[in-house]
Amino acid sequence: MAKLGAYYGLCPLIDQRNLLGVTDDSEIGHVIVTLGKNIAIKYRLSDQKQIHSWRTKDKFSSPVIYDYETNQYVAVFNQVYIRVWKGDEEYVDKLKKYKFNKPIHTLTKCNNKAFVVFKNGDVTPLSFAIENRKDLGTEIAHTENDADVLSASLKNDIVTGVLLRSNETNYFIWTVFSEENKETHKIELTRENVELVGQVLNQTEDQHGVHLLSLWSDGKLYSYPIYTQNERDIPIQVESPGNLFGLIESLSCKSPITMAGLNHHYIAMYGADPNQEGAALILYNSQFKVSQSKQPLKLFTSGAKLWHIEDNILLCVGQNLAVIPFYLDTEQLAALVGSHRAALNDLDPDITIVEEMEVTNWNLGPTAEAPDPHKSIPIRIKTKILEYSKQGLSEATICQEVLPEFIEKEDIDSISTCLEYFCDIPELCLAKLLKFCLIANDKLFKNTQPINSSSLPTNLQPLERCMLLDKILMCSFSDIILLPHIQTHLDLTSTLLLLQYICYLMTEDGHSLPLLNITESENKLIEWGCLLLDANYQKFLLSRDAKILEVLTFYSKLVGEYLNSLESMRQVAPLLTEIKKGKELIKYKQMADCRYSIEQLSLY
Amino acid sequence: MSNCKIHNVRFYKPKPEAIYCMALNKSSKKLAVSRADTSIEIWNLMHTPFIERTIPSMHDNYSIEDIVWSKDKLFSVGLQGFLIEYDLYSLTRKNMMAVTGEAAFCLDVNKDNTSVAVGTEQGYLNIFSIQDDEILFSKFLDKQEGRILCLKYDPSSKYIVSGSVDAIRVWDVNSGHALHKMTTGRSEANKVTVVWCLHVLQDLTIISGDSRGKLTFWDGKIGSQIESYQSHKADILALCVSEDEKSLYCAGTDPNIVNYVEVNVKEGNQKWVKNIQRKVHDHDVRSLVLYDNKLYSGGIDGYLACSYYPPKTLIKYPPILQNPCVTVCSKSRFILLRYAKHLEVWSLGKSADVENNSGLLPLATEPKHLLTLNRTVKSDDGRDVAEGIICCSLSSNGKWIVFSTDTVLRLFHFNYNEGETPELVPVDNLPDECSVSVQAVFTENSSQMILAPRGGNIQVYDLREGTPILAFTIPTQQSIKDTITFLTVSSCGQFLVAADPQSRIVVWYIKQGKWNLQCQLPVYNSPPTAMGIEANSRGLVVVYADHKIIEYDFASKAYTKFSKSLSQNHPKSWPNRLFAVRNITFDPRSKNVTILHDDSNIVVIDQTKVG
C-alpha cells in the first residue's frame, strides 16, 4: 500500500527555476534548501523552522550537500569552485575554495557518498575530485544546461548517470562505482515518433540490478538494464530503449514528467493531469505496474523538480516548496485484482506487442509442462477472450465486452459457450441475455426440436431456447444488483414468459436445471422467481391480466405446498433427532389429558 | 415390586372460599375462621395448624359478619340480624337471639366473658349477657346515628368504643351514653370515611383503621386524636395488637401488612413508628390475628397465612376442606368428591397394563362424571339454596351413597353399569335413629353402614336387606367425649376406630354381631391429624399434629416395637414439617410399607429399611 499524506508548505520560493536543490542534512528531519543562487537554508521539517542559513556573494551553482565522509557541507560556486565548510559559518565566502579546471555541473549524493558531476559528463567521487582537481580530464560528452543527473545504489555499488537531451536524440551516460572500479557506459535513448518525457534509475525487482526506466510521450515506460550484480545472469542483449515495462495513464505524458525512485518498488511521478487540468503526483508501483496513490495539485509547472528525502517528497507547488509525506507498505496482490487496465486509446494498430515470457513451474519436475491457462477456453470464443485476458482484464470485464457483441450478432452458440465457460458474469449482462433469449426469433435457434409439453408456453419453443434459458438461470447472481437491471431490461411480457417458464420447470413435467440436482435446482428457481416478483411487484399488484393472476396463483399454491410439507417435517423432526441420537423410540406417546391421567411409576 | 399406577385427578376443583373473619381462642389454641360461604372452620393451632372441625354453612345463616370466642363458646353475628352461639360438639347452632337494629355488623366480648356487645345497622349497641346455657338480652345503649361497623370493649370493660361512618364514639356501658364523639375527618369532601376496625389499649388509647387508609391514634379519655398515619393506599380492614401492646399489624384492601411498634423517644415519650411490612396476600386482607409471635392473616384469596419473624417465615394454608374430602371405592372404581355444598361421583378411567414403569399410560377408558348430588332448601326469599354437607360416603361396591347436611341425613341407592345412565334412588323410610351425623363410613363388603350421629354414640346399620336396619349402637360418652372427627373401619370389617380432636382414640371389634371395646390408645398431648388401619388389620397407624407417628397393635394393645424405634429414628426434619399429614394408606402387597402424605409430599415408610 502506498499512500501520500497531506502536504504542507516548507518555505516560499522566490523563483522556481532558481531553486537549485533540496538535500538531506546530517540530522534526520532536516533538509537543506538551496534557494536561488545566494542562499541556502537548513530547515527542520517538523515545524518548518529555519535552523541555519548560509549566504554567499558568489553564486551557488549546485545545491549544498552534506558529505558524510568528511562531515562537512560542500557546494559548488560559480561552477568552478568548491567550498567545504563545517556548517556554523554564515558567510561562506571567506572559506577556502578549491578551483577546478573543468566546469562542474552539479554535486550529487547517493547512498551517503558525494559525487561531482562535471559538465563533460564525468562523475567522480567528491574526495577524489578535490584531491585531483587539477588532473581530471575524461571527456565523455558535452552537456548543456539541461541534463538530468540520476543515481541509484545497489548495496555498495553506486550507479550515477547523466541524461543529456538534445533535439535529435538523448544520451544516457552512466558510471558504475563498485568497490574499486569505475565503469562508464553510454547509450542512446530514442524512439520513433515519441519523445522522452521522464527517466529514473531504479533497482530491478530482484534487487540485483539497476535499470533505467524511461517514460515516453505515448505513455509507455521502458526498462533498460544498466547494471547487474549477479554475474550468473546472462546479459541479454537489449536494444535501447529497452523492454516495455509498463504503461502510465494516470498522468498525461504529453508534458515532461519528473520521476524519483522511492524504493525498489515505488516511483514517485509528477506530471500533468490527464484531464489537462492541473498536475498530479502519483506513486507508481513498479512491481505490479499500477499507480497507487494520487495527489492532485492545482498548477502544473513543466519540469518541476522533485526530491525524495527520507519519507517525504519535496516538490515545488506554486510559489512554495511543499513537503508531501508518503507511506509505503508491501503491496497485496488481492487488492489490485481487476484494477489493471490497458490503455485502449492511441493504440497504433500496426504495432504488435510482443512479450516474451518464461514460464516456470515450481512443483512439478523440471521436465513437466506448465499448464496453459489459456487452453481451457473453448475454441469458439478463444480468440476474443484470449486477447482480453492477456491484458489482464477480470472475467466480469471480459464478459461486458464480449457478450453484448455476441448478442448483437445473435450468435447463440457463442453465448452458450460463454455461459458455460465464465463463472462471474455481471448482472447487467445476465439481464440483457435474458431479454435476448426470451424475445429472440425462433429461427435463430438451430435445433428446432419442439418440446412436447402442454404446460410450456408456446413462446418458449424450441428446445434450444429452453436450453439456453436453463444455462442463464443456472448462473449465480446477486439479487440486489440484478433487480434494477431486470426492471430496466425485461418488460412485462418477457417477465411473464420467464415466470411461466419457471412455473413449468417446477411442475412435474419440468426438468431440473442442468448440472444441479432437484433440490439445488428448485432453490435456484425459487431465487429467480422471488427476484422477478420483487422486480415487478407493483406491476403485478395493479394488473388484472388473467395470465399474471394464473402465474401468481401457481406460485402461491407452490408456497402453500412447501409450507405444508414443512409442517409435516416439523412433526417428524423431533423423531429424527431422537433416532439420530440413537435413543429408543417410544411407540405410543399420548398427550396427557389435563383433567385426568394415569401414570405408572415406582413409588419407593 | 413397588410399581403402582397413579391416577392424577385434576377435575376436583373445589371453589376456594374467601376468609371473612377470624377469632382466636387463646386458652384452647383454636382459631375460628369464617368463610364466604358461612362455613366456620376451627383450626387447631397447638402444633401444626390443621382443621379440627368444620361447622357447615346453614341455609338460613347466610351471612357472618363477625365472630368472637367467649371462653369456649363461639358467637357470630350477621346481616340477618341474629346473634348466634354455636355448639362445637354437634357442629350446629346452639342459640339464636335477634338483635335490635336489624343487620348486625360487629360484636365483642368483654374481658370476663360475661357480656357480648353487638353493633347494628340502625345504630343500636346491644348488650347481651352470657349465661351458662344461654344468652340473654341485657340492654342497648343510646341509639346513634349511622351504622356501627366495629366495636371493642376497653380492657376494663367499662367502656365500649364504636366506629361508624365519619366518627368514633366512646360509650359508657353502665350509663349507656356516649362520652366522646371523635370525627375522623374526610380526605375528600364528598367521600365518607368509614372506620372499619378498632382496638382499645389499656390506657384507653384507641387505634382505628379507616377507609382512607389511615391508622389513627386517639386518646379515649379526652376524646381527641393523638396521631394519624397514612399507612395504606386503600381501606384498612383489619387490625390486631400484640399482648404487650407494643406492636400492631394492620392491613386491608391494600394487602400490605404493616407493622407499627411503639418506641421510646427521648424523655420517656412514646411514639408509634412504622416497622417492617409483609407482603403476604395478593387480595384484600380481611382479618388479622396475632398468636404469640405468629401473625395469622386471612383474606379474599382464601389462604390462611401464618407469618412470623425471626426467622422470616411464611406458611400459607390452602383453602382445602377438612379431611376426608375424597372417598375412593376400590371395587367399583368410583370416587366420591366432597365439595362444600354438593357431592360428585366419578368413575375412574382404566389403562392398559404396561410392563415397564414408563410415565404416562394410554387411557383405555376415560373418567366419567356420573353424579352431582346436593340438597337444596328454600330460603326465606324463595330461592333454592344448597345446604352445606357435613359428611358423606360411598360404599365400596358403589351401590350406596350417604350424606348428611345440617338438617337431614340422606341415603341413596346408586346404580351404574357401563354404557348406561346412572340411576339414583333415594332410600325412603330411614329409621328414626338415622339422623344428622358427623361421620359416615361403609364397611368394605358394603354390608354395613356406620354412622356417628350428631348427638354422640356410633350406630351400625345393616344394609343387607336393602334398607338400613340399626344393628348396634356403640356408646361413646365414656370413651370419646368430644365430636368424633375420625371414624374408620378395617378392611376385614372386624375393627372400628373412632377418635376425637382431643386425641382420644378408641378401637372396637365385632364379635357375633356385637361391637365390643377392644382398647383405647393412650391420650397424647397433640391431636391426631390422620389415622389408618393396616391392611391386615393388625394394628393402627396414627399421625399426630406434631408429626409423631405411632403404630398400635390391636392384639397386644400396645405400641409396636417399630413404633417405638421410629420415634427415636425418624429424620430430623420430620417434626418440623409445615403441613399436617392428611391421609395414611397401606400397600396391600407389602405389610411393611406405610404411605402417608401431607399437602406437599408423599412419604413412604418401609419398616424393613428403617434401622
Image (cartoon, grey):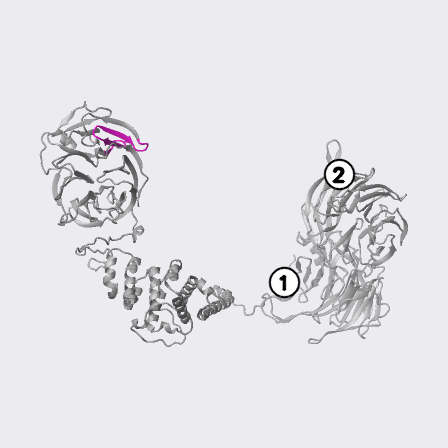
Along the line of sight, the residue nearer the viewer: B43 or B464: B43
* Chain letter of disc 2 in the image: B
On the image, numbered disc 1 is attached to which residue?
Answer: A603
Q: CA distance from mark 1 to mark 2?
A: 60 Å
Q: Is residue B255 left or right of residue B435?
A: left
Q: Residue furthest top?
A: A94
Disc 2 marks a residue whose amino acid type is Glu
Query: Could you say where residue A482 lies in the image, as x and y percent from the top left?
Result: 38, 60
Along the line of sight, the residue nearer the viewer: B319 or A579: B319
Q: Residue at x 45, y 65 (%)?
A: A540
Q: Quadrant of residue A394?
A: bottom left
| Secondary structure type for disc 1 | loop
Q: Is residue B500 magenta?
A: no
Q: Residue at x 25, y 29 (%)?
A: A41
Give the vertical position of A39 relative to B250 (above or below): above
Residue bounds of the magenta highlight: A22-48
* Chain letter of disc 1 in the image: A
